[in-house]
């Protein structure tokens, strides 16, 4: 095998009952190494070189399957490290919505609301996996069928998520799904990034730029209220690179209600467009993101706690990582003015998000 050939292999990661859970290793020599679980479609680790070529794992995660499973149990401080989120990413107010004049009730798992598909969303499933060796990339395709009534949602949904890693240090995540009855669907990936290396401290000194001039203000349960508001002259203006922690302690009502940033930004461009860029000034690692989605939930890790111990054996804590979740807007099933998340028979749900790691000069 030549030095430049990519790596793709599968290894046993653990068991859930009688079901084997596997980890898929995707790697390009001299570039990225990504480890993906077929449990929850989780990006467990992602090693990227710094400006001197030294690699470090730059995403938050757990070292064992047991830790992931325990974190999904009732009463846990669920953090969704690296997971595929569905059926509905983000929050649905009061766990209810109406579709085609029929009302639906969902289990509550975030105060009065349903978060990330409820207590047993896509992040808790073992997906079927297929290894992909394609010209210019290696990857893994994950499939799951969510039956009618799963999590309170109508219609059976066949969902597919594909991770592809290429020689340009790009991790592309492609989502597709179909339904046999009208339903709502909003999928994302919930990777937390720390470009200095996971477990190295908080991310407040890392800079962030968001291609968004508006964000969704929220109530005290983090449900959007009113129309999206301009970011001008506020701590929510990341149109130029700004340290994540530069204004996180400002006396702004939206920062106080969320304990920091946990809001949906309305992206300025549509289609497969630039969405965000983050940089760690010490290591020089640069993360650039593109997406087909209309919204981006930026979460600054406000609710992470010291009892979360990561893959490197170090405790995390508030601000240990940030999430950039490409998605449709929170509570869209209850907001006719937001982009629709309705999926009908005969239609195909599709989105694509690309993360590229490089280094700044």
Image: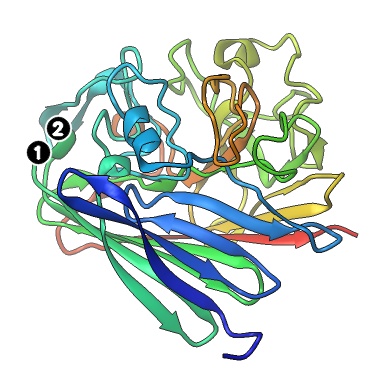
Q: Residue at point 60% right, 15% down?
A: 259
Residue 87 showing in the rendered view? no
Asked whether the beta carbons under mark 2 and mark 1 sit within 8 Å of each other, the answer is: yes
The one nearer the camera, 293 or 37, is 37
Q: Is residue 132 above or below residue 177?
A: below
Q: Give percent across and percent down for residue 231.
A: 69, 30
> Few, some or many C-alpha atoms within 10 Å of disc 1 (few <14, some 14-19, many ≥20)?
few
Q: Give percent across and percent down for residue 294.
A: 50, 48
Q: Residue at point 39% right, 77% down?
A: 132
**Secondary structure type for disc 1:** loop
Displayed quadrant of residue 260? top right
Q: Which residue is mark 2?
A: 152
The one nearer the camera, 1 or 276, is 1
Q: Residue at point 65% right, 48% down?
A: 58
- State how far apart marks 2 and 1 are (Cα): 5 Å
Q: Which residue is mark 1?
A: 149
- Which quadrant of the rendered structure holds the N terminus? bottom right
Viewed as shown, does residue 160 lie left or right of 36? left
């Amino acid at each position: 095998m030549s030095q430049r050939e990519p790596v793709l292999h599968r290894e046993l990661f653990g068991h859930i009952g009688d079901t084997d859970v596997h980890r898929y290793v995707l790697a390009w020599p001299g570039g990225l190494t990504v480890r993906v679980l077929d449990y929850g479609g989780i990006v467990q680790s992602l090693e990227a070189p710094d400006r001197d070529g030294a690699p470090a794992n730059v995403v938050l995660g757990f070292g064992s399957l047991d830790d992931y499973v325990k974190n999904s149990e009732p009463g846990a401080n669920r953090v969704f490290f690296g997971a595929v989120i569905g059926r509905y990413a983000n929050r649905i107010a009061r766990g209810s919505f109406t579709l085609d004049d029929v009302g639906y009730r969902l289990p509550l798992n975030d105060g009065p609301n349903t978060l990330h598909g409820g207590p047993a969303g896509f992040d808790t499933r073992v997906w079927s996996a297929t290894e992909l060796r394609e010209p210019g990339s290696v990857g893994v395709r994950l499939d799951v069928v969510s039956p009618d009534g799963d999590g309170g949602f109508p219609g059976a949904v066949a969902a597919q998520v594909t991770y592809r890693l290429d020689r340009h240090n790009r991790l592309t995540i492609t989502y597709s799904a179909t339904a046999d009855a009208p339903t709502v669907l909003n999928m994302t990936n919930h990777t937390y990034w720390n470009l200095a290396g996971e477990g190295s401290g908080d991310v407040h000194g890392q800079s962030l730029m968001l291609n968004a001039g508006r964000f969704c203000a929220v109530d005290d349960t983090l449900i959007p209220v009113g129309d999206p508001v301009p970011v001008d002259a506020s701590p929510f203006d990341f149109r130029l690179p700004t340290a994540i922690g530069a204004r996180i302690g400002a006396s702004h009502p939206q920062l106080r209600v969320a304990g920091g940033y946990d809001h949906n930004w309305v992206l300025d461009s549509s289609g497969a467009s630039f969405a965000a860029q983050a940089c760690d000034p010490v290591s020089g690692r640069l993360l650039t993101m593109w997406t087909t989605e209309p919204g981006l939930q930026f979460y600054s890790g406000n609710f992470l706690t010291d009892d979360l111990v990561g893959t490197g054996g170090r405790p995390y804590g508030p601000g240990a990582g940030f999430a950039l979740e490409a998605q449709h807007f929170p509570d869209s099933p209850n907001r006719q003015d937001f982009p629709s998340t309705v999926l009908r028979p005969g239609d195909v749900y599709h989105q694509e998000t690309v993360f590229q790691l490089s280094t700044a000069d």
